[in-house]
Amino acid sequence: MTAISISREVSPKRRKLKKIGVFTSGGDAPGMNAAIRAVTRAALANKLKVVGIRRGYQGMIEGDFIPLKTSDVSGILHLGGTMLKTARSEEFRTSEGRRKAYEQLKKAEIDAVVVIGGDGSFTGALVMSQEYDISFVGIPGTIDNDMYGTDYTVGYETALNTVVEAVDKIRDTARSHGRIFFVEVMGREAGLLALTSGIACGAEVILIPESTEQNDELNRFLKKGYKSKESSGIVIVAEGDPCGGAMCKAEEVRKAHPDLDVRVSILGHIQRGGSPTAKDRVNATRMGVAAVDALLDDQQSVMIGITNEKIVLVPFNKAVKLNHCIDTDLIALHQLLNR
Ligand code: F6P
């Protein structure tokens, strides 16, 4: 682990910052507003001015900026989504787009920026900071929890609870009809949301990219799980699983077992919404304050992480390149309880 733990003490080389920007980028996640609020209030408490950059990098290119004061971030801590909106920007992938973005930051006299997003957002910040004299510090905001160097990304915990609530409801109808449900969960190429929610819901089978035994598990369940028409089952499928997703897997099972009553539920974007849980709010708030501290300590191109409940700094070039390794003990635990 290359993360560096920081204390709350101020480093002697307090940087002369006057104004910082903050924006959200990539897929939104519950808790982003809590992070925006913490960044804004921590910066104001340190006598910095704060500019909200709307709509991610595209808004940076267009100069879509709003000054933020304490009252602007009141009453948002509990709201899902992001008050600054977010977007994915093809233009920012071009050097011309990044030049325009830099010109806008300079025109607004922004000295440094807090970027709240995932690996794509941090990659963009890293490239821009290598081309121009602008410092970025990142807060991992994505429901996928796929960032190296942190136990949590803002939004993951809320999404996990959303999936659990949804699957508990699906379980009711599965039991009533004696059906197998294939439930697709987000996470891009990462399977942590699927694995953890599957364990929390008692899913009989969990299909994730990080496990190579999923088909054996599914076949074992189909053979032993269906002694009587009374039985039902939940199969959680990570959207990045090589099986091609819940729809594809269910079709395969229907063909192989025409006697089974199979249904599919793609949870989709409800996993991205909702009021953030207390844990997500506290994590986002801690990371927001730490991000301002890091900028004042003249840190740049680092992500704020939380490992073992402690704030750590993870260099962008590690956070975006290395993978958040899934806990294989969790995979073994699920297999033990579903033999
Ligand atoms: O990265 C967060 C995420 O929700 C992924 O889990 C999902 O695959 C993707 O975003 C969906 O992207 P979009 O909102 O652009 O459809």
Image (cartoon, rainbow, N blue to C red):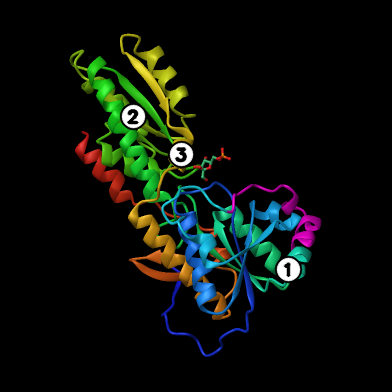
User: Is residue 317 visible in this depiction of the protein?
Assistant: yes
- In the displayed structure image, the side of residue 112 where residue 255 appears, left or right: left
Magenta region, residue range:
84-101
Residue hosting label 3: 186
Q: Is residue 167 above or below residue 11?
A: above
Q: Estimate how packed mark 3 is, as few (under 14), some (14 to 19) or many (20 or more) residues with alpha carbons within 10 Å.
A: many
- Which quarter of the rendering shows the N terminus? bottom left
Q: Which mark is residue 318?
A: none
Question: In the image, is 100 to the left or to the right of 144?
Answer: right
Q: Residues within 10 Å of mark 1 (few under 14, many from 20)?
A: some
Amino acid type shown at disc 1: Ala
| Residue 190 at x, y percent in the picture | 46, 45
User: Quick check: is 51 in the magenta stretch?
Assistant: no
Kindly check if marks 2 and 1 are in contact, taking CB atoms under 8 A apart as contact: no
Instruction: Say few, some or many: other residues with alpha carbon within 10 Å of mark 2 (under 14 / 14 to 19 / 20 or more).
Output: many
Residue 323, visible in the rendered structure: no
- Residue lying at the far top in this picture: please name it: 259
- In the picture, the disc for residue 235 is 2
Asked if 143 appears above or below 198 in the picture, the reply is below
In this figure, which residue is indicated by the disc labeled 1? 108
Q: Position of residue 334 (x, y in %)?
A: 26, 41
- Mark 2 vs 3, N-terminal side: 3
The front one of 105 and 138 is 105
Q: Name which residue type carries label 2.
A: Val
Numbered circles on residues, count: 3
- Badge 1 marks a residue whose secondary structure is loop
Q: Nearer the viewer, mark 3 or mark 1?
A: 1
Q: Is mark 3 within 8 Å of ligand 1?
A: yes
- Does the magenta segment cover residue 88? yes
Residue 80 coordinates in the image, percent (x, y)? 46, 48
Q: Where is residue 167? Give x, y as percent.
A: 32, 32
**193 lies above or below 255:** below
